[in-house]
Amino acid sequence: MTESKRLLLIDGNSVAFRAFFALYTSLNSFTNADGLHTNAIFGFNRMLDIMLEQVKPTEALVAFDAGKVTFRTKKYADYKGGRSKTPPELLEQMPVIRQLLTARGIKSYELKKLRSR
């Protein structure tokens, strides 16, 4: 009997955001020797472990947002207009989260940024 394939698609920005704010009250406890905050990296990795264990995918892909201008913002200028800016403590962790995925052998994808009009 052939084993069925199972693909796990993950919204990388959403998981990173959740991980960051889940450990936000401990933000200053999660730093490395260089002062890089690591709460989102830690939480993302932990959530990833849980998803992989529960879903048991044969393949996984993590998709990241490309930037501010998307097809949604082209159609509706105020899309996500009420949201605060992404905290710099989270932004600094995003490249490390991508490195984490590469190290774990999980592919990620980021759509090229759309040009604004």
Image (cartoon, rainbow, N blue to C red):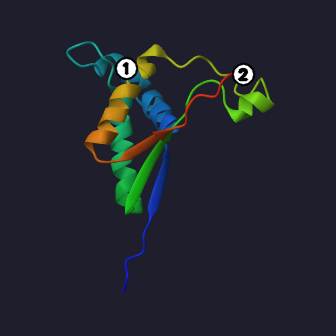
- Judged from the image, the secondary structure of the residue bearing numbered disc 1 is helix
- Label 1: which residue? 27
**Residue 32 sits in quarter:** top left
Residue farthest toward the right in the current orientation of the protein: 76
The x, y position of residue 23, in whole percent, is 40, 28
- Quadrant of the image for the C terminus? top right
Residue 28, given in percent of the width and then of the height, sits at: 33, 16
Classify 10 Å Cα crowding around label 1: few (below 14), some (14-19), many (20 and above): some
> Toward the viewer: 6 or 45?
6
Q: Against 83, is 52 above or below?
A: below
Q: Where 61 sits versus 40, above or below?
A: below
x and y, in percent, of residue 98 in the image: 37, 34
- Which numbered disc, 2 or 1, marks the residue closer to the eye? 2
Q: How many marks?
A: 2
Q: Using the rendered view, name the quadrant where residue 35 is placed.
A: top left
Residue named by callout 2: 81
Q: Residue at x 29, y 19 (%)?
A: 29
Q: Is residue 66 above or below residue 7?
A: above
